[in-house]
Image (spheres, rainbow, N blue to C red):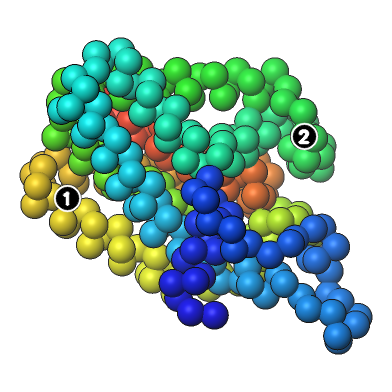
Amino acid sequence: MGVFRRFLLTLSYVTSLPIKLHPRVNQADFAPSSDANVYDDTAELAGLAKYLPAAGLLIGIILVGITAVLLFKLHAPNLVTGPIIAIIWLCLTGGLHFDGLMDAADGVFSHRNRERMLEIMMDSRVGNFGAITGMAVLILKCATLASLVAHPLILLGTLAIVPAWARWCELYAIARFPYAREMGKGKIWHDSTRFPEDLLLGIALPVVATAMVATFVGLTNVLPVVAFVLASGLAASHWLASHIKGHTGDTYGAVVELAETGCLILVSTIML
């Protein structure tokens, strides 16, 4: 399979963009097949994690384009622009990472033993801790983005690179820590990711994109953003792993949301 098709396949899984390439996957697909004639389509999912930062970069480009229209064409008020960007950001991922954040919060904040946490996270229903965490993150994203509207260069530079770096933090969690379950939809992502080789491959595009953005908005408006998102994402990766002795598909999504939100909070409180 070519690199571009693998990138499109990644997009089909981690965004809501109208790309229909993903194979049919169910829980049984993650067990080795005893029938040599049965096609194991999990092979198509192997090695996709290194494309996550590239998927984040595309999300960032879309957000920059929409934000530019809101700022310079429609002249939308700050308190309208912030929530619109936050909601579009959420919609571009189909709520995938947001759902993972809420499931992870239900499990981790239950303060049960590890096995019980993992059981709670598998429940499709959202509990109190998940709902509170989800609302808090969404409110914080709306508020911080609205506060950044008065500083267009910082806002556009942040939107351009944060989704890519947040997904590099997700790649770090996938590669660095063991998978916390014996089976699961995120296991193939972990098992097929090489540490540290894929981390180095995955970081190349965010670095290039950051350098390009810096030429437009200034190095001082970009480097702190990278530091903030990495600090937030890597801290979230280690904190979550310490509770469940590894990661799951839900905590991968939580890392992305916490990296993005933590960065926005730090940008709006320190850089403005």
**Which circle marks residue 213 in the picture?**
1
- Depth check: give the residue in front, 84 or 29: 84
Q: Give the residue pinned by disc 2.
A: 124
Q: Position of residue 139 (x, y in %)?
A: 45, 18
- Depth check: give the residue in front, 227 or 161: 161
Q: Position of residue 28 (x, y in %)?
A: 85, 63
Circle 1 — which element? helix
Residue at figure coordinates x 38%, y 71% from the top left: 201
User: Of label 1 and label 2, which has the lower sequence position?
Assistant: 2
Residue at figure coordinates x 35%, y 63% from the top left: 203
Q: Residues within 10 Å of mark 2 (few under 14, many from 20)?
A: few
Q: Is residue 91 placed above or below 195 in the rendered structure?
A: above
Does residue 9 appear to the left or right of 272 in the view shown?
A: right
Residue 94 visible within the image: yes
- Residue extending farthest to the right is 34
Residue at figure coordinates x 16%, y 57% from the top left: 211
- Depth check: give the residue in front, 166 or 21: 21
Q: For residue 254, which quarter of the picture?
A: top right
Q: Is residue 54 placed above or below 47 in the rendered structure?
A: above
Q: Is residue 235 placed above or below 206 in the rendered structure?
A: above
- Give the Cα separation between the discs numbered 1 and 2: 39 Å
